[in-house]
Amino acid sequence: MISIVLPVYNGEKYLKYSIESILNQTYKDIELIIVNDCSTDNTSHIIDEYRKKDSRITIVNNTTNQKLPKSLNIGFSHCKGEYYTWTSDDNIMLPSAMEKLLYDIQKKGADLAFSRCETINSDGKIIGRTELYNDLNELYCNNIVLASFLYKKEVHDELNGYDVNKFLVEDYDFWLRAYRKFKFYFEPEILYQIRFHSQNLGVTRLEQVKLCKIELLKENLSYINDERIIDSIYREISNCYFQASNSYYGKILNKKDRNSITKERGKDFIKKILGR
């Protein structure tokens, strides 16, 4: 069985598309755990209606708003499957996603498989595709796992789930911790649609996401011995500093400096700040 957790907070606009994409998977041995994180819109009615139609759905209603990482852990505590994944209320799993990722884990000897995605706009129109990755060490600099993934239950158990202190980068933190202990496999087929719209956390909290990523990358420097990877991490930290233009970090340099400084100079700047 594959256990799929769907945390939702006021997701009425796109929720039905997400639920239907899960229930219509070609791989049928699934359970769907929907964690309603104190929604105040029509979310409760929508999930109740789907629960009446499909016995594979379990609903968990949080009594107080817990935010994403804790809601994920709550959801997974109710799961019975051997394989885990989770999805968002505004994204869509393509029909063969679970079947293909499960095949990859079983046939490639992987503990976690993730796939390429395509991006869609608020109306569902395809607007782009994610990259092909030949070097999985790119994960040390960027969250290349993104939103289409499946992993063994033991990965979740070994890592004790998602870190509730890593809100906004809880998934990236999980992948980094998992990558140090488990085997990953990248599936080049597009199996998932990521929806971009005005209410995405990556849009509404872009600056905060960048700041959280800076701290996460700094934490992970201590686990890396490869100087090539370390240099790449420094460059990405530098990029995040300057992208968070309204933050404390961005204000260290004035606008003219931020616009003219090169990535290499940025890397040296970060090394100086970190004392390395």
Image (cartoon, rainbow, N blue to C red):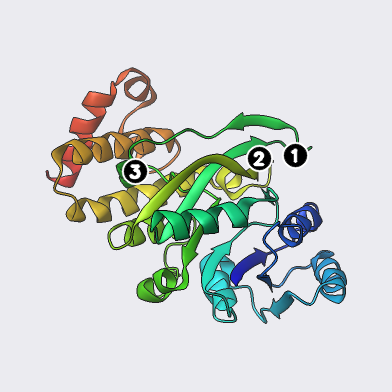
Label 3: few (<14), some (14–19) or many (≥20) C-alpha neighbours in 10 Å: few
Circle 1: residue type: Ser
Q: Position of residue 101 (x, y in %)?
A: 54, 54
Q: Residue drawn 62% across and 58% down? A: 87
The three-letter code of the residue at mark 3 reads Leu
Kindly state the secondary structure of the residue where label 2 is placed.
Answer: loop
Q: Name the mark on residue 195.
A: none
Name the residue carrying label 1.
122
Q: Classify residue 231 as left or right of residue 248.
A: left
Instruction: Tell me the quadrant of the picture where the C terminus can be found.
Output: top left
Q: In which image quadrant can residue 120 be found?
A: top right
CA–CA distance between discs 3 and 2?
25 Å
In the image, residue 87 above or below residue 204: below
Pick whichever of labels 1 and 3 is earlier in the sequence.
1
Tell me whether the residue at label 1 lies in contact with that at label 2, contact meaning CB atoms closer than 8 angstroms: yes
Tell me: residue 227, above or below residue 103: above
